[in-house]
Image: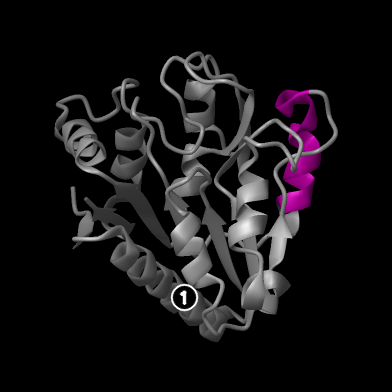
Amino acid sequence: MSLTWHQFSEKAELDTQLASFIADKLRIALAQHGRASLAVSGGRTPAGMFRALRDIDLDWARVDITLVDERWVPANHADSNERLTRENLLAGRAASANFYSLVSDAASPHEGLACLESRLSVFKTPIDILILGMGDDGHTASLFPQAPELEAACASEAMLAAITPVTAPHQRITLTLPAIAAAASVVVHITGESKRALLETALSEDKPVSAQYPIRRVLDRVGRKGHVFWAA
């Protein structure tokens, strides 16, 4: 598998270098297409990178931003990826970016799916650069092992899928595997020795489409467009 690894001794260096990498990809897209798009993940890992990225001088008003996945909770909820993204990325220079939320007032992600697909119909696709995280179970985005909707989300021609994790709280909305794989550049952003070991295990499995490690299924599709940014 032709992934490009970017390794750093400290997380602070990883944050600044990944922010610069993302900004470069967005600049290229802006120059080529007049617009650019970015999909980001939530959690604690990207917060420092978000703060570095938001201060970079870009024509943010022509950049579309959305989430790779979201928990089906209100946008001000403690577990909301949107809340963390608004607090850490959509500020400073990046406050003028066009943000596309992945939640609505529907009772469930399954019920809200059509509305969200319509909302993202004007989002710039294919996505220019997409940032993935990875859970301790090998999930990425909200493509969870054992989720009843996993296979459909890996095969769907739609941009989004509703997911009900078995091993994590909250129903989710997620970009589908084909939507992720269509991105021009895909980054896996991880820290720590345990995450590196897990990713290396997933990549070494003999079964390339094993449902045990959705991250492997994604990266098999991404191929040479994939990058790993890692720091101990």
Query: Residue at horizontal 31%, vertical 63%?
Result: 14
| Above or below 86: residue 16 | below
Q: Residue at x 78, y 32 (%)?
A: 112
Does the image show residue 103?
yes
Name the quadrant containing residue 133. top left
Residue 41 lies in magenta, yes or no?
no
Residue 129 shows in this picture? no
Residue furthest toward the right?
Answer: 105
Image position, residue 97 (x, y; %): 68, 70
Q: Residue at 65% across / 75% down in the picture?
A: 92
Camera-nearest residue between 77 and 190: 77
Q: Nearer the viewer, residue 11 or 227?
A: 11
Callout count: 1
Q: Nearer the viewer, residue 18 or 24?
A: 18
| Three-letter amino acid code of the residue under disc 1 | Ala
Q: Is residue 220 left or right of residue 207?
A: right
The colour scheme used here is: one colour
- Main secondary structure type of the part rendered in magenta: helix
Please give left or right for residue 125 compared with residue 226 in the image: right
In this view, 32 is above or below 145: below
Residue at the spot of label 1: 23
Q: Nearer the viewer, residue 34 or 201?
A: 201
Q: Quadrant of residue 208?
A: top left
Q: Residue at x 23, y 38 (%)?
A: 199
Q: Residue 63: image x %, image y %? A: 63, 72
Q: Position of residue 159 (x, y in %)?
A: 61, 43
Q: Where is residue 58 shown, x and y percent of the image?
A: 57, 83
Which range of residues does the magenta coloring cover? Answer: 108-120
